[in-house]
Amino acid sequence: MHRYRSHTCGELRASDVGTDVRLSGWLHNRRDLGGILFIDLRDHYGITQLVARPGTPAYEALDKLTKESTVRVDGKVVSRGTENVNPDLPTGEVEVEVGEVERLGAAQPLPFTINTEDGVNEERRLEYRFLDLRRERMHRNIMLRTAVISAIRHKMTALGFNEMATPILSATSPEGARDFVVPSRLNPGKFYALPQAPQQFKQLLMISGFDRYFQIAPCFRDEDARADRSPGEFYQLDIEMSFVEQEDVFQPVEKLMTELFEEFGNGRHVTSPFPRIPFREAMLKYGSDKPDLRAQLELVDITDIFEGSEFKAFAGKHVRALPVPAVQDQPRKFFDQLGEYAVSLGAKGLAWVRVAEDGSLTGPIAKFLTEDNVAELTKRLSLAAGHAVFFGAGEFDEVSKIMGAVRVEAAKRAGHFEEGVFRFCWIVDFPMYEKDEDTGKIDFSHNPFSMPQGGLEALETQDPLDILGWQYDIVCNGVELSSGAIRNHEPEIMLKAFEIAGYDRETVEEKFAGMLRAFRFGAPPHGGIAPGVDRIVMLLADEPNIRETIAFPLNGNAQDLMMGAPTELEEARLRELHLTVRKPQPK
């Protein structure tokens, strides 16, 4: 028999009754019932119940062990009997009557319980991440991640893509976030940068003639944490294709996402094909370029209705309405709570009206609306008895942010929110440029290396704020999975695009010399995208925080509490790297 096990803890079934077996695992839980000791033994594959009788060496040995100790046990598989079957366990029809026990590794007192979700704080969990990962939910999430990545590789290869690796030590990237830098011992005073993304390398692979590339790529960005963004390190499915237009990129990505979310989504429906929503339409209808389409409500721009109005709350402002049908049975608390929610987002309040049975409007602001206002609102919003309308007024961006969130919250509270689905969409037609409100300067609004729609002619003849880029985002349930673009592969178009944003030719030639040199040797039209693996798994696992899907994440302050990183370097090491540390002065 094998030194540690003949079977795993998830393997035994009723057909194994009478078999002598050897199991190894962690002491998950214990129960002493009438002097008989019942032990749940856990390994990677599952749980098997052990039984130890009083007065036996096995009882004495198991009774002394602490939870989470590792043991080897020898014993015989016996039936639990019909009345004692545990239907929640695959091994629930049997148990192992233990004859011999070997302690493999004793466990100290635990900092938190493993066999229950006891609400321990995240810092403690990350400090003892190796214990946290023993919990069923975390173990399941990490194995889901493993399965998803394996499936991605298989599906991408089937779609004709070739997996390739790109460098980790490289030069500073123009991705927009802060780089993590690595000092060069052999080149004093110079630094490598860890890649924010393999962006330039994957474009260079296209220029090198490889046509369809993919990589499960580690990316490094020195940026603050969010619920859907881990600081420091993350992984993305990096994709690039040659001789393609926007729709050519969409087709394989849409097929991949549909298959992934159908395979690992536990029966949740995937809506397909994915709608293409222009950026400006998304901002008007949903108040966000990351719309959650499970919310079956839309915002309506009604600014023109109140132009010149004497109602000061709306006059001269951007006004957005949110019509919500079938709220006739909602109490006043429904309206008050939505108002409180809007205030928590920064609004001064949330105006609203109801539509009565006779079609008239009632509510706090009804008296300020003229007959023409009411008639136009009724027509524009297709109002009927039982509807309510919520209003936001102010600057465009402010109203979009607040009313976009109110749209989703109202849908959830009023029963207009789809559960159990994955609603994808493509956000397209992003503006190439935007104006800085403080300086008036024209700058790139999204990705400076995207091809402008209309090419060089558009750059030379159109108002920069009217130029759109071949840029796109893929969004699922309100979470942006990735940005992508058809790349600007023409040197003269690239130089002109940067000139509009205030960069002279010499600066661009200097900062992006490598890419421009490559473009001048016959670059194919190419484009790509890089969906975040961590975010994909977060959605599939239905977890609110991305760190719940990463085995060893940093905390919100970019610290590894388990390993003690980042650490200080000894003086000898600093000298070897030609570094001097200058710490900030205490305030």
Image: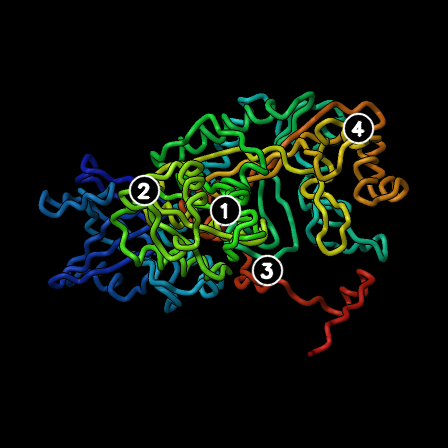
Q: Tell me where residue 564 appears, x and y as whole percent.
A: 58, 64
| Nearest-to-viewer mark from 2 and 3 | 2
**Circle 2 crowding by C-alpha within 10 Å: few under 14, some 14–19, many from 20:** some
Q: Nearer the viewer, residue 563 or 160?
A: 160
Q: How is the image coloured?
A: rainbow
In which image quadrant can residue 493 be found?
Answer: top right
- Label 3 to label 4, Cα distance in Å? 42 Å
- Three-letter amino acid code at disc 3? Ala
Q: Nearer the viewer, residue 575 or 449?
A: 449
Element carrying mark 4: helix
In which image quadrant can residue 92 be found?
Answer: top left
**Circle 1 crowding by C-alpha within 10 Å: few under 14, some 14–19, many from 20:** many
**Circle 3 crowding by C-alpha within 10 Å: few under 14, some 14–19, many from 20:** some
Chain-order first, disc 1 or disc 4: 1
Q: Residue beneath label 1, please?
A: 320
| Nearest-to-viewer mark from 2 and 1 | 2
| Nearest-to-viewer mark from 2 and 4 | 2
Element carrying mark 1: strand
The residue positioned 47% from the left and 40% from the top of the image is 146
Q: Is residue 1 left or right of residue 301?
A: left
| Number of marks in the rendered image | 4
Q: Residue beneath label 2, please?
A: 359
The residue positioned 88% from the left and 40% from the top of the image is 505
Element carrying mark 2: loop
Chain-order first, disc 3 or disc 1: 1
Q: Tell me where residue 34 appears, x and y as whole percent.
A: 11, 63
Q: Nearer the viewer, residue 297 or 47?
A: 297
Given the current orientation, which residue lies at the most extreme right position?
Answer: 506
Q: Which mark is residue 558?
A: 3
